[in-house]
Image (cartoon, grey):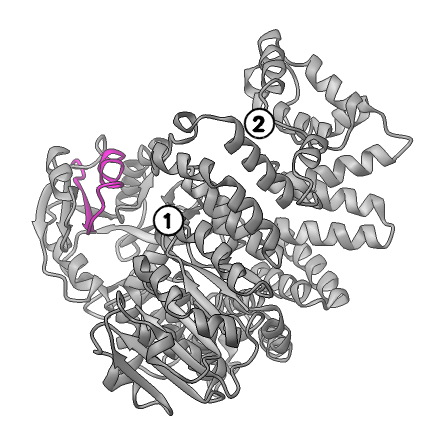
Amino acid sequence: MKDIKLSQCMIVKNEEDNIRRALSWGKSIVWEQIVVDTGSSDRTMELAKELGAKVFHFPWCDDFSAAKNYAIEQAKGDWIIFLDADEYFEPECARKIPELIRHAENDFPEGKKPDMIRAALQNLDDTGRTFMVGEQNRIFRNRSDIRYRDPIHEFLCSKTGKPLLWMQAVESLSIMHTGYKSSVIQKKGERNLPLLRKQAEREPENPEVWCYLAESLAGAGRITEARLAAEHAFSYALKQGEYGNNRTGSYTKETAAKRGTAAMKGPLAKGLPIKGLTGERFGELCALWLTLAKDETPQTALDLAGPAYQYYGEFRRTGLVNPDVDFAMGNYLAKVGLKEDAIRILEGAFETLERWPGGASLRLTGGVQRACNYLAACALEKGQTGRAVSWLTLSLRTDRYQEEALATLLGLFKDDPNTNAEQEAAFLGRLYHLAAGKEGLKDRLFVLKSALAKSDRELAELIRRNMSEEERLWLDTAKKKPWLSGREELKESYPQIPVRNRMDLNFLSLMQELSCRPADELGEGEYGEATAELLKTHRDAFLRLYAKLGEYRSRQVLYGILEMWLGRERRSLALAGEPGVPGWDLDLIPTAEQFACANVGARLKESTEGFLYCYEDMYETFTCFSESGEESAELSRYRDVSVLQAALSTLCLDEAYGKPLDLLRFDAGLELLSLLKGSERHIRENHSRLILSLEKNLNSLYELPNLLLEWNPDYRLYLRYYGTEQAGQLVLFAV
């Protein structure tokens, strides 16, 4: 057989961070590399040329299939590998591709030769670990009839209508996908939304389009909108009628092959009342809706219990099996406090997971360890220590660096008079590398830290004995660093803040570090030494703010923001991200009935519509102040909503609005302090509820709380963060 030429193709836009890896993995196996740019403004094209790719330009037309098909038309190879810039094969996988193609060419009879090769797709989180596995057809013959279809969420098909045949290779090939990292997922969600909205307008009763729209809204952090879109998908998918696919009539082997999927087996293939979705997609829809319902505010989540049981019941009645749906339902029930049902369904989810085929797609994003930890807590409440140990062990097998889970497990061992340190170490040795040697240093330090936190000195000493002399010396030196204080020392140094949990310890440790370390050591991150110096200078203000914040959700946000400014790991800020409508919080401001409201600054249309979504027409007046007044026509159509043009730098609400104002929202960047000072009378006399967008502004965060409490000591302060750690709104509430 002649040598097979492989063409690697991709479409890109502003991928300078990914392009080098995207073009490097295949150098040893591909014959040519085709890069089609759709409008980059960074160094993507320059780097692609340096790496030897053939570079083309395609004007973006809101159609991914059109751009990909253009790339295919430039390819001259016999087969095409089409990956995105944030996808790649590991070297050992890449080396298998030529042999798999030779197998597809030589070992199948005429008429049965595969058109595509199916690989696994591993989605990676911020730590580089796989959290979701699926399957994709990305290696295919370069044939004139094989092209992509649909403007978004495109798929391969034959223009002749003939089914495409695929060869299963998920056990051999895995595409690694970094596009679900928190730093990019919101950007992708926002990018896809306009395309999906257009498609939903063209195909309003297509449930798969509404599924994709819900997923993109969820990726953009718009929890409520995403849930409502998922409900649209349900409303069309559950109409009575034969099971069909999303583009033609009944779902048959032929239509399945057109999309490169296997024909459905089981009850759905027999005509149960689900239309427009494969069984896998219907399961994904159920799991997505349940996850979104869990992520709503506590009261909203509880109010959704009825629909949750309904949708879960619809899924179970199909006869389908999917651990994702069971885990999502169990985690939702745990969130809303329906404990007995949560335990029953989560335990059943683990039984389902044991029977789940290895190559099948799962989206267990944190579902397993969250469920394990919840079941462990429930077992402890019932005094079932053995079951609690089993669940905690399973949780730590999925992620062994969970401090709280390990601390709970060590606490159980310590309380058991029949368990000594040697037995503890032997048990933990199944989860961690505790033996001497370089490989286990991280594990030993992690377990040692937890053992010391639980005052398990015998276990701590046993672990220390497995350390090298160099490691022990390092530990002894670290103890002398004044910012590495223990719990009792922190309590003594900061009596104004009770140490009740890990959040308090983390924050006070950070304050101690600001107190002891010089700015040039602290300011090594992206925000620099000047920011670190400001944090050190105003450390007392942050301590006062932490003490004044009304809840731990707000304190988590403050801690996450300070860590971000010091250039630390942004996990805390990611965990603090708030679902729901940005800038409005029904827990903090439950009603706006008979309120006179002022909305000043940026994002007026978005914020006004968010207000109306939360409070409907239960307000008296809603006045917007804008630099341009451009939103006037759109917003004035709402009842008692008006838009006034005003220069924010000189606006004084005390003069511009004589009547009492019950609610003030400011989103004005550097003008925020002057706007507040121009509203002092309203704030002092009317105790106006305040919603202040700080835009991660360091000065605002230490100046404004003190000013507000000086004017009105009765204010309760809260912080919220909407979005991801890379792109979001920091909002201060005073109520």
Residue 644 colored in magenta in the image = no
Q: Quadrant of residue 251?
A: bottom left
- Residue 491: which quarter of the image? top right
The residue beneath circle 2 is 483
Which residue occupies 32% across, 54% down?
137
Residue 498 position in % (x across, y down): 70, 45
Residue closest to the eye, 688 or 637: 688
Drawn side of residue 370 relative to residue 162, left or right? right
Mark number for residue 637? none
Labelled pair 1, 2 in contact (Cβ < 8 Å): no
| Image quadrant containing the N terminus | top left
Magenta residues (range): 1-26
Label 1 packing within 10 angstroms: few (<14), some (14-19), many (20+): some
Say which of 685 and 156 sits in front.
Answer: 685
**Residue pictured at 37% horizontal, 68% vertical:** 678
Of residues 359 and 38, the one nearer the viewer is 38
Residue 165 appears in view: no
Q: Nearer the viewer, residue 421 or 212?
A: 421
What residue appears at the point 43 percent right and 37 percent down from the top-left corner? 566
Q: How many marks?
A: 2
Label annotation for residue 183: 1
Other-residue count near label 2 (Cα within 10 Å), few / some / many at <14 / 14–19 / ≥20 = some
- Mark 1 vs mark 2, CA separation in Å: 30 Å
What kind of residue is marked 1?
Ser
Give left or right: position of 434 versus 417.
left
Q: Amino acid at mark 2?
A: Trp
Task: Indicate the position of residue 19 as horizontal and vertical percent values.
Answer: 22, 40
Q: Is residue 470 left or right of residue 261?
A: right
Residue 65 horizontal/vertical position (percent): 20, 63
At numbered mark 1, what does the secondary structure look like: helix, strand or loop? helix
Residue 432, by quadrant, is top right
Q: In percent of the image, x 38 and y 92: which residue is there? A: 639
